[in-house]
Image (cartoon, rainbow, N blue to C red):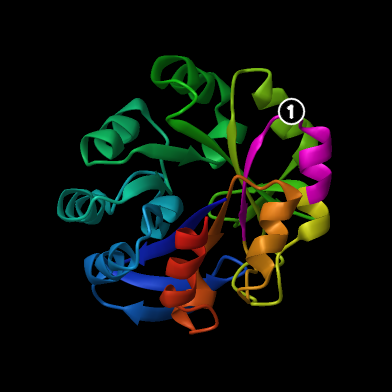
Amino acid sequence: MRIIPAIDIIEGKCVRLSKGDYNTKIIYNENPLEVAKSFEAHGIEYLHLVDLDGAKSSKIVNYKILEQIATQTSLKIDFGGGLKSDDDLRIAFESGANQITGGSIAVKNRAIFEKWISEYGTEKIILGADAKDEKIAVSGWLEESNEDLIPFIQDYQSKGIQYVICTDIAKDGMLQGPSFDLYKKILAEAEGVKLIASGGISTFDELPKLAELGCEGTIIGKAIYEGRITLKQLENYIIDL
């Protein structure tokens, strides 16, 4: 299972929110590049970089930070937040993203998201399936849609999607453990999906459990910043793998 730390960006700073609420913002570091370099120094190869300003304004905003991290580290970056147009996507890839995550766009403009899947290929495009009570949420989680989570994933699997990041919004940033039951259900019903678990990771012991369930990767945010999981623990875990 891949270990994927998260850096969420607001106004150029590394922050975390609780349940996607912008009013709960905590700034952990003024310098995202410094944070990314510390991940790399501990043997981490992947990064989940989220442009929260972009998610709010519906267009890519913090691509310069993406570019900085991509050019000054060897991390493989999955970038998301506010990608709404072909132009946004082009900027993200030109700025050094390895993959992009599309969430709101996959709900609100299926035609363009499906075009991205066929143009860029399924290795490059990740489906962001963020849910509250098993309903898909969009626009930086500020809106709930009528889409049911598992049929939504299955539908995109039929369009070629392999990678899916699923965040249970109720768990995100709460440090109360991930949604094991939800992930189990997704893996059983959306056969063959490369599921990346996100939200709620609070202790190191949860990681082997997610791996055992069959998750392809896990995104870890606040647990790292709050010192619940150390980079040394992650480094040892990666070495053991």
Q: Is residue 186 magenta?
A: yes
| Magenta-colored span | 184-198
Closest to the observer: 173 or 146? 173
Q: Horizontal and vertical percent for residue 28?
A: 37, 80
Q: Residue furthest front?
A: 240
Q: Is residue 175 left or right of residue 234?
A: right
**What residue would you read off at disc 1?**
154
Placement of 68 over or under 20, stated as above or below = above
Closest to the observer: 203 or 117? 203
Q: How many marks?
A: 1
Q: Horizontal and vertical percent for residue 187?
A: 77, 40
Q: Horizontal and vertical percent for residue 9?
A: 36, 63
| Residue located at (72% from left, 33% from top) | 152
Residue 223 visible in the picture: yes
Which element is circle 1 on? helix
| Residue located at (50% from left, 57% from top) | 3
The amino acid type of the residue labelled 1 equals: Gln
Closest to the observer: 186 or 241? 241
Quarter occupied by residue 133:
bottom right
Quarter occupied by residue 161:
top right
Q: Is residue 9 left or right of residue 136?
A: left
Placement of 162 over or under 114, stated as above or below = below
